Amino acid sequence: MDPLLIVVAVGIGVVVGLTGMGGGALMTPALVLGFGIPPLTAVSSDIVASVFMKPVGSWVHIRRGTVNWQLVRLLVYGSVPAAFLGVLAAKALGDPENIQHAIKTALGVVLILAAAGLLTRLYMRLKEHAATRDGTAPPLPQERPDVTPRPIPTILVGVAGGLIVGLTSVGSGSLMIIALMLLYPMLKASQLVGTDLVQAVPLVLAAAAAHLMFGDVDWTVTLPIIIGSIPGAYLGARLSTHIAGGIVRRVLALVLVAAGLKMLGASNEATVWAVATMLVLLTVVWGLLRRRFGYPFFGGGRDADPEYQI
């Protein structure tokens, strides 16, 4: 059993519990790029490990009442069958070499999309916070609001997310939570995370069952992930209401872009230059956006609200 893999799993578990994002988006690329594990095996092992990790973070949010069960039900209607079909779609590619290449390419694209979605989420939160401060928007909810479910769009989000998770193991927290935020902007960040984590439990169960049927899981990889990610996810979920996730999310966006580029075959030099350029541009553009909405160029100070310190 690789102790380094356990350590990596602990760190990724903390990110998942803290932000609701980064499980498959970090673990699968780490397995492929850092440990040389074939993409299909990495996806399968990560999904099976998620069956044990997701309930840990979910239970913390359930106890705190940060789960919208109506939305969970609608998402599950679409995500569970779609996740199973996503695995079947991957296996339908036939030739093992084609399967590995297709999954690696799909991972690269999804990781970059996840980074873009993460930055979109940060911008929307900044805009919402500024509108509330200026009195042009209703106050941010302090308790769980009674949102009106939108059945068809919510089910479609579940279908899309399930397919992507089944194929790449990425998408539950990285993409679906963005779609939920767009559909239900009145939900607090902690409620988005809690709802997404809970709906992901049956989703990954369906995907894991399909991978186990086809024998793609490597337990020498899966067990260290389980051992490390469970305490990590619990710790992250406990910290999620006390630590500002803004810096974590910005760093996560950079990591996702770097991993995505490597999955798409970019050289180390090209990846470093791309991430460095993105870091500079992100710092400048984000500072200008903050100034546009009446905040200091850099965060901190009086606007350092734990939920919106972004």
Image (cartoon, grey):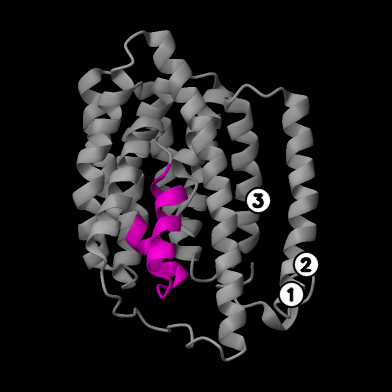
Disc 2 from disc 3: Cα separation: 19 Å
217 left or right of 246? left
> For residue 251, which numbered disc appears in the image?
3
Residue assigned mark 2: 288
**Relative to 38, residue 58 above or below:** below
Q: Looking at the picture, which amino acid does disc 1 mark?
A: Arg
**Image quadrant in which you'd find residue 65:** bottom left
**Along the line of sight, the residue nearer the viewer: 79 or 216:** 79
Q: Position of residue 131 (x, y in %)?
A: 58, 82
Residue assigned mark 1: 292
Question: Residue at 36% across / 30% down in the picture?
Answer: 167
Q: Looking at the picture, which amino acid does disc 2 mark?
A: Leu
Q: Looking at the picture, which amino acid does disc 3 mark?
A: Val
Q: Position of residue 34 (x, y in %)?
A: 59, 26
Query: Per the image, is 188 magenta?
Result: yes
State whether residue 49 appears in this view. Answer: no
Q: Main secondary structure of the magenta part?
A: helix
Disc 1 from disc 2: Cα separation: 6 Å
Q: Residue furthest bottom?
A: 135
216 left or right of 278? left
**Relative to 87, residue 9 above or below:** below
> For residue 35, which numbered disc appears in the image?
none
Are the two marked residues, 1 and 2, in contact with CB atoms closer than 8 angstroms? yes
Specify start and end residues of the magenta stretch as a single range: 171-196
**Along the line of sight, the residue nearer the viewer: 259 or 243:** 259
Q: Position of residue 137 (x, y in %)?
A: 51, 86
The quarter in which the N terminus is drawn is: top left
Tell me the SS state at disc 1: helix
Tell me the SS state at disc 2: helix
State whether residue 150 appears in this view. Answer: yes
Question: Residue at 45% across / 39% down in the picture?
Answer: 24
